Amino acid sequence: MSIDPERHAEKMARKKAARDRIMATKTREKGLIVVHTGKGKGKSSAAFGMVFRAIAHGMPCAVVQFIKGARMSGERMLIERHFADLCAFHAMGEGFTWETQDRERDIAAARAAWETAKELIRDPARRLVLLDEINIALRYDYLDTAEVVRFLETEKPEMTHVILTGRNA
């Protein structure tokens, strides 16, 4: 299949012009709220990819782990050993609920993690905050979903990106 080079160039010029018109309307930068959810693996890994990209660009960021606690992950080791100046890491969970089997303790840990997360998000110097496994805390009613949504809608600085991970979003 051969395409005439001139015809191809015209087609691409039209596409570029259309794209340029769309991009001209996108004049405002803003922080995003990103949700990584689903049944399979890779939610936290995808989010940490975004954290490492922010670190590579010199953007201050933070990680709050709502469920995972004492277990030392590779991401945590890398951040704490090499990027602690750019990324605060708070592993505040006590393990998965089937490991702790203590609902009140899980609720207290999730609430403490949420309070830490709110302070980190409120800091306009932080460009990205990862709320790792918060969806699990919301799913089990350890946190009030409406409160979390309201906070993100009303108190998140305009330029801050917030990533929420976990199943059952």
Image (cartoon, rainbow, N blue to C red):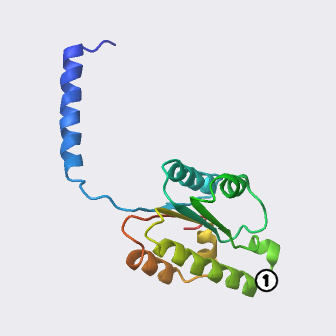
Q: Is residue 142 visible?
A: no
**Could you tell me which residue is drawn at 63 percent across and 77 percent down?**
113
* 96 sits left or right of 6 in the view: right
What amino acid type is highlighted by mark number 1? Asp
Picture residue at 54% right of the left edge, 68% below the top: 169
The vertical placement of 83 against 9, above or below, is: below
Residue 101 lies left or right of residue 117; in this view the side is right
Relative vertical location of residue 122 with respect to residue 36 in this rendering, above or below: below
Judge by depth and name the residue closer to the eye, 1 or 107. Answer: 107
> Of helix, strand and loop, which one carries label 1?
loop
Q: Residue at x 34, y 13 (%)?
A: 1
> Label 1, on which residue?
102
x%, y% of residue 57? 48, 49
Query: How many numbered circles does the render carry?
Result: 1
Rendered location of residue 9, percent (x, y): 22, 21
Height in image: 123 above or below 41? below
Question: Camera-side residue: 104 or 83?
Answer: 83
Residue projecting furthest to the front: 85
Q: Residue at x 21, y 26 (%)?
A: 11
- Residue 71 falls left or right of residue 110: right
Q: Measuring from the top left, give residue 59's x and y in whole percent.
A: 48, 56
The quadrant where residue 168 appears: bottom right
Quarter location, residue 138: bottom right
